[in-house]
Amino acid sequence: MSESYEATLYDGLSAAGRACVAAPTINALEIRFPDGDVISWPYATLALVSDEGDGNRVVLAPGRDADERLTATGPGVFRAMLAVVPSLGDQQPTRGYRMAALTAGAIVAVLALVWAGYPLIKDGLVAVFPAAWSNRIGAEMVNDEAMFDKPCTGAAGLAALDDLAERLSEGAGLRQPITVHVRAGDEVNAFAATGGHVVLLDGLIQQAATPDEVAGVLAHEIGHVKHRHPLKRLIDVAGIQLIVTGISGDVGAVGTMVLMLNYGRRDEAQADSAALELLDKAGIRANGLADFFDRMAEKQKDRINFTGFLRTHPPLADRSALMHGHKPPGATRPALTDQQWKDVRAVCQPVRE
Amino acid sequence: MSEVLEARIDAPQPDRLKAGGDGGNLLAIHLMGLLLTLVTLGIYRFWWRTNVRRYLWSSLSYKGDPFEYTGRGLELFVGFLIVLVLVVAPLMGVYFFGYYLLKSGDLLVGGTIMGGTYLVMFALFGAAIYRVMTYRLSRTKWRGIRAALGGSAFKYTGLYMLSLLLQVLTVGLATPFVTIMVYRYILNNVWFGSGRLTFDADWKPLFKYYIGPGILRLVALVIMGFAIYQINQASGQGDAAERAAVLQGLGTIGIGLLVLLMSAIAMYWYWAAVIRTIFAGMEFEGVRFAAPVTGGRYAKFMIVNFLLVVFTQYIAYPWVQLRILRFAASNIEIHGEPDFTKISQNTALQPRFGEGLGEAFL
Ligand SMILES: [Zn+2]
């Protein structure tokens, strides 16, 4: 208690200091000047301004918003002052390597918890997600003009595709009927969005040799819809976005990019087996999808630009074999009539011209 | 020669800032910030930033007294919310209104509105830079005396747009002129208490440092533009020819990137010259400054910083932050000493809220 330290007082009005001595007393810090003046700063409001540094300096203020500063110097003055005024210790931010290690451990624990709990949260969200919202979001996605070319409007072709989709999804237990959209463009690809919206690109229709191939691709996309992959992926992306935005503060758009991301291997396999089931029920040859994959892979060999469907649906080694080896349980009939197939191939005719 | 030597010996040793700080402590602050930011879904970010600044500011001292950062996380948070509600939301509303008009066929009005919002966003970007500097200086104290940035974000925005325009029109050659012009505005508005910083410098000596990297960059852009043109030309010439052209084009782009990298490295010599010029041109209440940093040392410093951050996946970031303080402390010379009795508290120039605009646009 009798300890005192050389110090300089800055009065908060000028940058010039006054030499003094800082002496801790029972409940206030006394600042004594050579001319006999004494100022007293109560411990109750005393604020710690400086860091520990080398420990031989401490800067204090009489209150958190005060402009006055007292810089006391002397061996070990920082610790000594903290020992006398315990409330200063609370103002010292938690620091040190041990703290760093503990915090790093806590971060890992939080991430692990999120990682482990995430599938449960996701399943819960999928279960309660209103159908009307899925539908709105899906419609928004497939109508994104930055993403797709113009919608194709050939009425007969669209009706034929809707019939095919209805035939395929009968008894599949979908929450919403499938809406098939066709978009112009040369890319060979197809997408499933939320709310049962499925997009076929005209390039895919033009590259397909038979209606069975289109039916196969459509069944695969309906398989994604059945397993609610679009909504699950949307939730994934929203979750990642939330974390990225939270940390970086960057409010970027996710938007339709969601459609361009690959599904995982497991999702693709699920969609494939659902497709087989749907095709069987509808009495359509399952070879269509396999033929389509094979031909796309063949084409890809001598082209520089990737074929879209293979980019978003990476060829799985056993996929084609699985489908080729599949025997339909009953009699089959063509996916579309000749007239319907003509209409479907012409669905983008008005837009192309 | 001996005369010069004597003059140097006679001149009093320059004063310097002193940099301290401990990387482990700063790492702990960063990790705690990251943890709480994760847990609060991002809201703690503002307090994280505040804690880091408090540590960095206090790690730098002059004449034995540390600098202080007195900003609060809450100020940053409130500033962010204000900008979100008063600036970002209305701007987005207007933008989407323009988009809606455009989609419903009114190309002229819709396009004008959308272009206008882009222009406003550019201007706000300039204003944001100035607001951030204003806030940080106003929350900087030394010996209990506040610093401040006067001037107006509005004027700075004009200067910012003008400098962008000049740089575009001169394919970058106006950069030295623009650099000095912008610093002249900022630095002449810096206050510490009642003391004011003044700054003047000539941009012309900087030009010879800029011309090398400036030309290299133009060359790189021309090379890459040519490569893209080549690739475009080749499309539709048949598969084999197309593939060959694309490969060749990619090779050319690689060369362009290499030249661009060389230009970026050569720019360190320019920035070192800018630092020397700026410190030589400043005066504060009779005190002069110098920062005799060479291009080579500055390049090494910056490249090491970059490598430290990249190779440790940001774990070394706290050490890099402290390295920057040490680099400043060891390179800035302070010649002379102000009359501290004449520097009093400045009660004007106090922004109320945080750096909201910066939060939204930087
Ligand atoms: Zn798929």
Image (spheres, coloured by chain):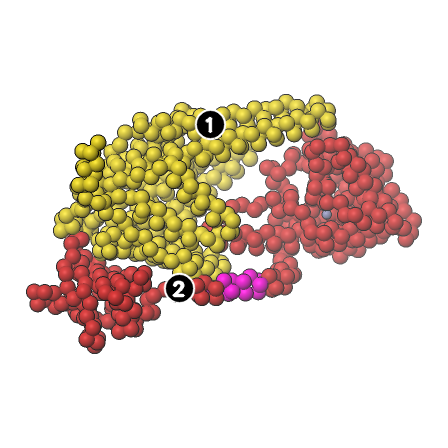
Provide residue B124's location: percent of width, then percent of height. 38, 40
* SS type, badge 2: loop
Looking at the rendered structure, the kind of residue marked 2 is: Arg
**In the rendering, which numbered label is found on residue B187?**
none
According to the picture, the residue beneath numbered tag 2 turns out to be A95
Asked if the magenta segment contains residue B43, the reply would be: no
Counting the numbered discs, the total is 2
What residue lies at 61% left-to-right and 64% top-to-bottom? A116
Name the chain under label 1. Answer: B
Chain B, chosen colour in render: yellow
What residue lies at 51% left-to-right and 37% top-to-bottom? B99
Q: Is residue B159 visible?
A: no
Q: Is residue B325 above or below residue B275?
A: below
According to the picture, the residue beneath numbered tag 1 turns out to be B216
Provide residue A227's location: percent of width, then percent of height. 72, 55
Circle 1: is it few (<14), some (14-19), or many (20+) Cα within 10 Å? some
Quick check: A199 left or right of B318? right
The residue sitting at the right extreme is A331
Q: Is residue B267 visible?
A: yes
Give the chain letter for red: A
Name the chain under label 2. Answer: A
Residues rendered magenta in the picture: A103-114
Q: Nearer the viewer, residue B238 or A250?
A: B238
Q: Nearer the viewer, residue B150 or A171?
A: B150
